Amino acid sequence: MTLDVVILAAGQGTRMRSRKPKVLHTLAGKPMVRHVIDTAAGLGADKLHVVIGHGSDDMRQSLGDAGVHFAVQEEQLGTGHAVAQTLDQLGHDKVLVLYGDVPLIRRETLRELLARVDEEHMGLLSVTLEEPKGYGRILRDADGQVVAIVEHKDASEAERAVKECNTGIMAMTAAQLKRWLPQLSADNQQGEYYLTDVIAMAAAEGVGIVTAQPATPIEVEGVNNRQQLARLERAYQHSVAERLMTEGVALADPSRLDVRGTLTCGRDVEIDVGCVFEGDVELGEGVRIGPYCVIRDSHLGAETVVEAHSVVDQTVAAGHNQIGPFARLRPGTQLAVKAKVGNFVETKNARVGEGSKINHLSYVGDARLGEGVNVGAGTITCNYDGVNKHRTEIGDGAFIGSNSALVAPVSIGAGATIGAGSTISKDVADHALAVSRARQISKADWPRPTKSAKD
């Protein structure tokens, strides 16, 4: 059997009060519709169809690498009308209809629904809610069989008392869909073509309507405004925090964690409050992350400690490293075992050798440091000449005095010493001392300036 997945994403989302399409607003660092696409792709779908309308150019640009087929709904005339835009692109077997603003639907729930679909049965995902206001209601006959769905606006008082609600997510065969969609009518309060009307058509044909329900209602909750988006964000982060703690991660406060990508942790990892993990992050055994750090697309080896308020971006730390507090490790930073990058230090495209230390208030960019190097406070590698970047090479065991400027391209030899306050623009040999600073002048009994009488 083949599978087509149709994702409805044409609406504007006026309640978001935003210029961009609603489904491009992010949850956990990724557009909502991307969550739905990723879930659908994991079902082994043969084709993913995204129905676009409002902000179609933005949608095409954002999803251009997602491997989806676009169908354009020029005028938004309801869910049935939206699905109809894909009819010519559909295969011959199963079709699953999803929504770009329902980002937390689980793959397991959809598999259960699809397993019940054949030529004699279509699938409907329903949910039981204590407060069902605004949702379409599932209507069943005396035998408990689904016979129709009525929208809240069109429902009678008795129908509104029903707590089993329509999620909008359904599955059927392509043949069924192609039979029913042309029969839809816009004879309702909204003047729209409701996809839900195919339920009554299926019942009239004797096609069985089988239902499944999500594990929790949050799976099928949609986003119409920023409050709902924030609520789903917290629900998502809560599930991530629960998984991490189950795997042995210690979280100081599970409610103050944000994972916007993939976070993989070894045993005995500790994460303090307010930390954000973006992209693909891996933390080795015993790693400790202090409060309010941002870790992005990085691998931190075992027993590494990242102190408070540090930003670590596209960095590889081999293990037993110390980072921060208030450090910024930019892309291309590589720390060998036991290397240290201290407070208010910035690195970029720098390889720091085993046991080397950049402890305070320094910038090291486009540089390679050997083993056991000590970089004093206030040191900078002057790597940019206004047009090109240049490298600084520092040999094993070199000592760089405080407040030094290393003007690249330049090489500091193994065991060399740079006197504090020096500006070094020429290579320094192994085990040599290089000092470049203004001559100190002292004047004995020098009178300090005094204020003039007019002041």
Image (spheres, rainbow, N blue to C red):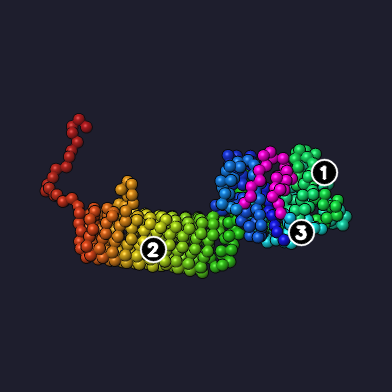
Residue 400 in view: no
Q: Are marks 2 and 1 in contact (CB under 8 Å)?
A: no
Relative to 296, is 30 on the left or the right? right
Q: Kindly identify the amino acid type of the residue bearing the numbered disc 3.
A: Val
| Residue sitting at x 61%, y 56% | 38
Separation (CA) of disc 2 from disc 1: 67 Å
Judge depth for marks 2 and 1 and give the one in front: 2
From the viewer's perspective, tell me whether residue 133 is left or right of residue 411: right
Secondary-structure class at tag 2: strand
Quadrant, the C terminus: top left
* The image quarter in which residue 362 lies: bottom left
Quadrant location of residue 13? Answer: top right
Front of the two marks 3 and 2? 3
Residue for badge 1: 156
The alpha-carbon separation of the residues under discs 1 and 3 comes to 30 Å
Q: Quadrant of the N terminus?
A: bottom right
